[in-house]
Amino acid sequence: MALQSRARPEAPIISDNLTVQFAARSLVQSNNPFRLPRSVVPTRYQLAITTDLEAETFTGTVVVDLEVTEPVRELICNAIDLSIHEAVVRVGEQRYPLSTEYVHAEERVRFVAEVELPPGQAVLEVRYSGECNQKLVGYYAANYTDNGEDKRLGVTQFEAPHARRAFPCWDEPDFKAVFDVELTCASGIIAVSNSPERMRRDNADGTVTFSFEPTMLMSTYLVAWVIGELELSEPSASGQTPIRVAARPGQGHLTAFALHCATHALQWFEEYYGIPYPAAKLDLVAVPDFAFGAMENLGCVTFRENLLLVDPESASRTELERVATVIEHEIAHMWFGDLVTMAWWNGIWLNEAFATFMELSCADAYRPDWEMWTSFGLLRTQAFETDALAATRPIEYRVDTPDDAEAMFDILTYEKGASVLRMFEQWAGPERFRSGIGAYLRAHSYSNTETADLWTSLSEATNTDVVAIMDSWINQGGHPLITASPTPHGVLLHQTRFRNLNGSAPDATWQVPIRIRAEVDGTTVRRSVLHSGEPLAVDLGGTPTQVTINEEASGFYRSEYQSPWATSVLTTAPESSPAEQIGILDDLWALFSAGRSSIEPLAVLLRGLLTAEASPLVWRRASGILGQLVALTPIDHVGLQHYWRDLAQELAVPTWKTLEPTSEPSHAQQEVRALSIALAGTVGAYGPARQEAARLFALQTTSARHS
Ligand SMILES: [Zn+2]
């Protein structure tokens, strides 16, 4: 697909009809007392903010075009920690002063008119002031020192929901509007916002005013600006979209990797979604004082500095992977989240799970040698462990207040959510999944959705009942254990809830998308089946000699094999892909934790897998398991402690010795060598490995001092 030739869609022009249409579609009346009334709908904000960065204060004027849908006396919107100086409403030629009542507990203001406002158009004008706070949310001061001098940037962070700390607004994601931003600050300061700079004006008082192009129709939590002594990189171009990195001065040499990665990502996502990038430019802004990893403000993405600025010459691969995936995650949101947005905060899990899924897909395309989906297996392990606890939670749950949604920013949202999407994508077929995503984004562009809207689009694209499948995964916590037994014709699959030993989680069943690969009469047979709870016999044309019921470990469930496969899976594991090896290792560890397997099969598997040729990711997972085994063994259980120690030595020392440094070891060899030394020295308590680690550490610190 030729991206460069694809025309950029214009931002929607706001006409009354369109406004009403959006309002009717997305603004569902709600009984939730935390939701604003729908009697007044904002369509456009003209926002002018003058900041005194030294004093960390600002004054603002906001002019809001409103559609009044029923007669009202008061305009209720969100504002907190702002001083309102004057508010008026205009209806046609008439201007009506408004009295202001703060409702602090609900972070609202009520602007009350002396007359009733009729349905139709109205314009709210508010003059106000506030402080750039130290809370890292709203409009805040990001402090740093430069050559011993205290400095600061003025930065916004409006998710979720903090736009109300910077300007009075209807601060809920389904009140989408167009934003015209104008920022005034001292000369010498640079300002960036969501849209390209339209005009820069020097004022008589020595200040400078930056005006920006109107944004597309979008939610308040995506509005952003950053002001300060910023240095902007030369733009890199992806099609027609200029991409820049903005950072404190003197860091220009650390921007090339981010630009390269973002340029690839923007183009890759345009192709994947089949929709041009929805904003007119993309700035990636490094912020020295930032609470989150990064924030997907449309066209003006903010990052913690060390997640954007990196020197590829000295950075480790892990650091580069982290920077790349964070950039890819945020760019994925420009469509999924920004162009199409959840109607309320209960949808935040899907926003984040999907962006996590997409960041991995994009990173896998950017650097196939990073094997991102294999390394994701290690993160999925953590999600499995949390989700196996009786106290786990459903992925989606009822959210009344924005605070309720804060609890969604965890491993069950990001890693379990992304795992469930990956499971379905691999089972339904990546191309059909992609076309469902594209259809969903096209159908709901510039609008808001419920979770079920995505399932509807995916159902149509994949010809399956996605609602039934996904409801079983997102509305209840936990995950299944699938047990495979041989039959004369293939395999019989049983499903139960996976529980740790003595676990008390209630029974549950899932609609489990399962991908089977089997060897039958010397032929490889593949089947994709849906396990709905009842025992399921799958015809494979004969009894397999070998079988895996979770191909490439893309399913979010535990697998257990009955004899004779319980043994053959151990011996054939070294021939599997690293992703499957990690899956088999992890399943066996889980079965041991659940009291369903003894330690011997795990030891057999570890002996088979941990070789000098094995993937470092397999070594990493195996080392983690051995470390956990030692930690779980009582200190006075000397016999067992020695067993782990001897096993770790037996596994690690030969590999370490095999991988003596050569002139040009591969990255994998270097990492396996390091991991084998670490395993021998820690769990193995092996003296020579500890000495080698100390020697390498001394070497590293000496060379760091001299460089
Ligand atoms: Zn995100």
Image (cartoon, rainbow, N blue to C red):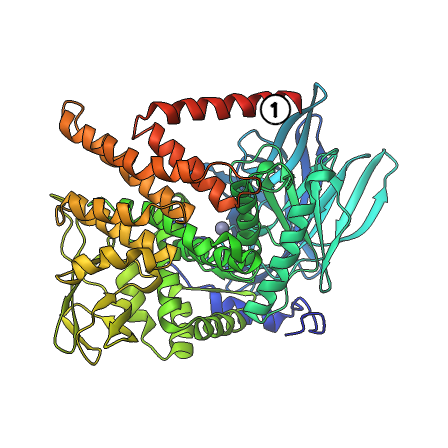
Left-right relation of 225 to 71: right
Residue shown at 62%/60% (left/top)? 266
Residue 219: percent from left, percent from top: 55, 55
Above or below, 272 against 75 in this view is below
**Dot 1 alpha-carbon crowd within 10 angstroms: few under 14, some 14 to 19, many 20 or more:** few
**Image quadrant where residue 198 sits:** bottom right
Q: Is residue 308 visible?
A: yes
**Residue 208, image x and y in percent?**
81, 39
Q: From the Cβ of disc 1, is ligand 1 less than 8 Å away?
A: no
**Residue drawn where x is 48% and y is 66% of the image:** 26
Query: Mark 1 is on which residue type?
Result: Ser
State which quarter of the image contains the N terminus: bottom right
Q: Which residue is mark 1?
A: 703
Farthest residue, direction top = 148
45 or 495, nearer to the observer: 495
Local SS, label 1: helix
Pick whichever, 123 or 220, lies toward us.
Answer: 220
Quadrant of res 580: bottom left
